[in-house]
Amino acid sequence: MRREDDGQHGLFASAFHAADAPLAARMRPRTFDEFFGQKHLVGPGSAFRKLVEADRLGSVILWGPPGVGKTTLAEIVAAVTSACFDRVSAVSAGVADLRKIVESARQRRSMGHRTILFIDEIHRFNKAQQDAILPVVEDGTVRLIGATTENPSFEVNSALLSRSRVYVLNALTDEDITNVVTRAVSDSERGFGNKNIRFDDDAKKTLVNFANGDARSSLNMLELCVAVAEAQHEEPSEELLIDMNTVTSAVQRRAVLYDKNGEMHYDLISALHKSVRGSDVDASLYWLARMIDGGEDPLYLARRIVRMATEDVGLADPQALILTMAAQQAVHFIGLPEGSLALAQAVAYLAAAPKSNAVYTAWGAAQSDVENTRNDAVPIHLRNAPTGLMKELGYGKGYKYAHDYEGGFVEQQNFPDALVGRTYYHPTDRGFELRMRERMQKRDQGPPKTE
């Protein structure tokens, strides 16, 4: 016995999807053997499948990108274990909805029936909503299957997470998507097997590429292509040709897997930053293009690129900060798409530039001393003396004006007594920092001695 949440708890779902349902719904796998991809979970002999078939699977969190089978897998688990299936979306469901489900689950349990509570996009539940689930998961009233596209370590309460097993679902391979599309074209019961379709190989490869590892997107695109092909033929019996022109005109572009507020946002900016740090110009440009294509805020990218200039290039190339600030101004001034080229120029420059984190490290060390040592008074010879009283107290007395000395160098104490001898900045031998190091070495040697 399985139940779908359609806003009216207690209504039972049909065992099959209506003929006028979307293709993606009709083609949803009904068994493990119909499932494409995720062999580590659904393949014969896999631990997950064995636990399900033995009806010993506890509460789980299914984590993976869109369109990889999280909802389908939950439905198959319910079917294999003959459990009642309550599905809610965390986008629209509230605590009151959960209470109704829990009450129904308790009644079923008293009659010997178990309930699977499937929560789609569980990461969208707030703490109070997640806390409301915890007691009924603990006492076995419901078996929880949560689905999320976000890292559950950050988005699911630790108490709930500790009582669930996390399973990771991966983006489908092109081979998996090809199999999904091929089955939909040939399936006479649920797909397009009753239509006279000829699918060009190149067109199919393009559609698969556009799907980006998302089975649902691939089926939605296929359904649109078939509709376009049918519109071009007057007789239903005519062969429906799906060629490259059909796919490109119907689909326009690939499905974009990007969420500016989700984990992929952080993964991609990390990849961009680390590619720049690793001096890989091409990879840096690729990750930048991915983020811009996904709709990332260009000023966010500009801010992060400025950070790369100061953190990873530093004084090895002082022009890096100037150029990245110019890129920020260009993006702010002209926007996208024209401003993307300024960001690309800045990223390419940073990736190719000599690298140094010496200032970054030095700044951290200086901040640590400020935080962890006494904030002693400024040495009296370094203090300004704008008034007569301050002069009488010795403010500025003994200060050596550097410009009065040969080379502009002078030896005097600039640290508080407790920090004399501290060294924070250690310039590298890369780029402009080599000159910085030579200047500092010359300063440490002191002024030339006269005979």
Image (spheres, rainbow, N blue to C red):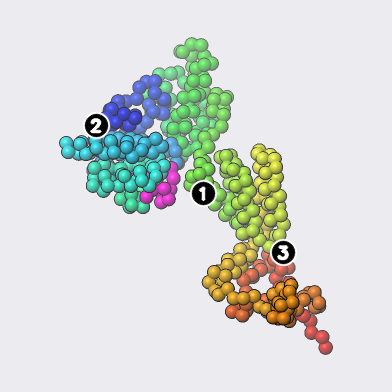
Q: Farthest front residue?
A: 389
The image's mark for residue 432 is 3
The residue labelled by disc 1 is 267
The image's mark for residue 1 is 2
Question: What is the magenta range?
Answer: 149-157
**Local SS, label 2:** loop
Say what amino acid the circle numbered 3 marks: Phe
Label 1 crowd bin: few (<14), some (14–19), many (20+), radius 10 Å? few
For marks 3 and 2, give the CA distance. Answer: 72 Å
For marks 3 and 1, give the CA distance. Answer: 32 Å
Query: Magenta segment: does it hold 413?
Result: no
Residue 230: x and y in percent read: 49, 17
Q: Count up the numbered dots.
A: 3
For marks 1 and 2, give the CA distance. Answer: 41 Å
Up/down of 328 relative to 79, above or below: below
Residue 360: x and y in percent read: 61, 63
Label 3 crowd bin: few (<14), some (14–19), many (20+), radius 10 Å? some
**Which of pointers 3 and 2 lies earlier in the amino acid sequence?**
2
Up/down of 210 relative to 349, above or below: above
- Which quarter of the figure is the C terminus placed in? bottom right
Q: Nearer the viewer, residue 118 or 129?
A: 129
- Which quarter of the figure is the N terminus placed in? top left
Say what amino acid the circle numbered 1 marks: Asp
The image's mark for residue 19 is none
